Image (cartoon, rainbow, N blue to C red):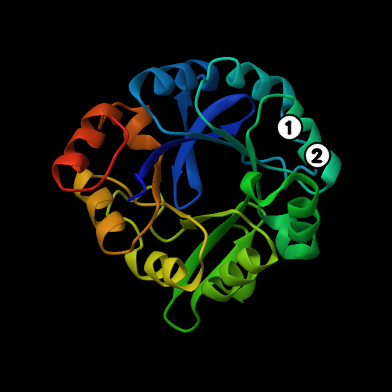
Amino acid sequence: MLTKRIIPCLDVKDGRTVKGVQFEGLRDAGDPVALAARYAQEGADELVFLDITATNQKRATLIHLVRDVARELDIPFTVGGGIGTVADVEVLLLNGADKVSINSAALHRPELIDELARRFGSQCIVVAADARYSPQAGWQVYTRAGTHNTERDAVAWCREAADRGAGELLLTSMSNDGTKDGFALDVTGAVARAVSVPVVASGGAGKMEHFTQVFQQARAHAGLAASIFHFGEIGIRELKQHLQAEGIPMRL
């Protein structure tokens, strides 16, 4: 049985780690390089770095910061934000990223997923989907850091991304993000059932039990969180020990 993964996320703006609620009200959470070093020492399975303003500002990811973070890590490192071409991916991989996360560019031109998977291999191509729920339309995917509704169904888009060659899906519930009320089990479970690639659940973690639920009920392969780790509310080592005791296979 494959072990489940715990993944801290560094949302980076202007060179600092930030965290908000439902993609708004951002507050400072510390230096990304120092946080990366801490998480590697605490037993994180992977680390995700998202340059959250790169797409809206129409610029490339902060390469120098990616390089500095990578130097602190001996665990897989995923980088996203402002990635839209083969050249963008190549630069990031050369500067320490193990995987890249694409979002807005993939929805704008889905063929990009096929191109990147052929060029670099599916194992390093992550497609991120930011989804928000509405009673009228269900779960739909948003782009541009959650500011633009594509009106595309989240499960259908995740299935297409996997079919095109994404090796992993990073599914963030905008409705749950930062609330600490728990992951969106319904859409996470629906995506996990619809695809054959790993699904990383993001948005809403506030208690250790929330990770138990997303692994056991929604069948997610990994749980991603930010503020509970940044502000010391839950320790990664303690979380993994708790999950192991719950019968969930973890790398301790």
Residue placed under numbered mark 1 in the picture: 92
Q: Is residue 228 above or below residue 204?
A: above
Which of the 4 image quarters holds residue 230? top left
Tell me the element at label 2. helix
Give the residue pinned by disc 2.
88
In this image, 113 relative to 162: left or right? right
* Whether residue 149 can be seen here: no
Which residue lies most toward the front here? 1
Q: Residue at x 32, y 47 (%)?
A: 205
Percent x, y of residue 118: 78, 53
Q: Are marks 1 and 2 in contact (CB under 8 Å)?
A: yes
Name the residue at 33% across, 56% down. Answer: 183
Q: Is residue 171 visible?
A: yes
- Residue 28: where, in percent of width, then height? 47, 28
Q: Where is residue 112 drawn, in percent x and y?
A: 79, 58
How would you rate the neighbour count of disc 2 (Cα within 10 Å): few for under 14, some for 14-19, many for 20 or more?
some
* Viewer-side residue, 202 vs 54: 202
